[in-house]
């Protein structure tokens, strides 16, 4: 009998999290928002040929509020500092909820940009932060998958 094909991601999220300071009391509200953002981004994810996006919550030791785990590629692992995002959003007295959503979304799209470049064979040490941030900003502003991904493809061609 033929065995069913089981996709096992190359990198285990729990093993990755062992190497970080995790946030056991991460605000549940943030995870709810993140899950809805991932749904919003499912078309983009598909166009970028990212098989899965796995999110872990950490307390960042430096200024970075989000990290892409190198070599997780099509089964992208993104680590988010939920508290840092919340603190940033709290500075917005008028629409903190919207700011939190938009901040998380732009972080996730940015890290998806790294996952995409990595999946196309460009190691993270060759990534240009400005290009990846440009991609994220362009997508968050216009929501045009193809136009934004072209920014990354242009960079791959030049590399
Ligand atoms: Zn980056």
Image (spheres, rainbow, N blue to C red):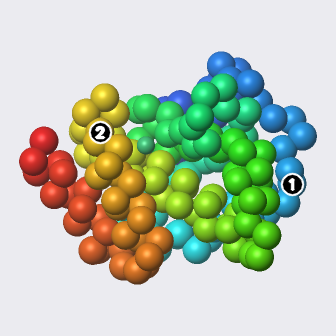
Mark positioned earlier in the residue sequence (2 or 1): 1
Q: Looking at the image, is 41 positioned above or below residue 106? A: below
Q: Is residue 91 left or right of residue 28?
A: left
Q: Position of residue 46 (x, y in %)?
A: 42, 66
Residue under pointer 2: 127
Q: Position of residue 43 (x, y in %)?
A: 46, 73
Picture quadrant where residue 118 is located: top left
CA gap between label 2 and label 1 equals 32 Å
Picture quadrant where residue 40 is located: bottom right
Residue 116 visible in the shown view: no
Between residue 19 and residue 107, name the one nearer to us.
107
Q: Which residue is at a point 68% across and 68% down the rendered structure image?
A: 99
Q: Are marks 2 and 1 in contact (CB under 8 Å)?
A: no
Residue projecting furthest to the top: 19
Between residue 87 and residue 26, name the one nearer to us.
87
Secondary structure at numbered mark 2 = loop
Q: Position of residue 115 (x, y in %)?
A: 40, 46
Q: Position of residue 36 (x, y in %)?
A: 69, 69
Q: Looking at the image, is 71 positioned above or below residue 35? A: above
Q: Is mark 2 within 8 Å of ligand 1?
A: yes
Residue under pointer 1: 28
Which quadrant of the figure shows ligand 1? Answer: top left
Q: Looking at the image, is 18 positioned above or below residue 74? A: above
């Amino acid at each position: 009998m033929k065995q069913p094909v089981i996709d096992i991601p190359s990198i285990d999220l729990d093993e990755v999290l062992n190497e970080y300071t995790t946030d056991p009391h991460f605000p549940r509200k943030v995870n709810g928002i993140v899950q809805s953002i991932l749904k919003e981004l499912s078309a983009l994810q598909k166009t970028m040929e990212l098989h899965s996006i796995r999110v872990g919550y950490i307390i960042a030791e430096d200024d970075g509020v989000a990290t892409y785990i190198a070599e997780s590629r099509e089964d992208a692992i993104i680590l988010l500092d939920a508290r840092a995002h919340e603190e940033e959003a709290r500075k917005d007295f008028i629409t903190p909820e919207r700011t939190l959503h938009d901040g998380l979304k732009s972080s996730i799209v940015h890290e998806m940009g790294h996952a995409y470049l990595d999946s196309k064979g460009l190691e993270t040490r060759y990534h240009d932060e400005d290009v990846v941030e440009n991609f994220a900003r362009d997508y968050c502003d216009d929501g045009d998958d193809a136009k934004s991904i072209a920014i990354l493809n242009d960079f791959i061609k030049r590399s």
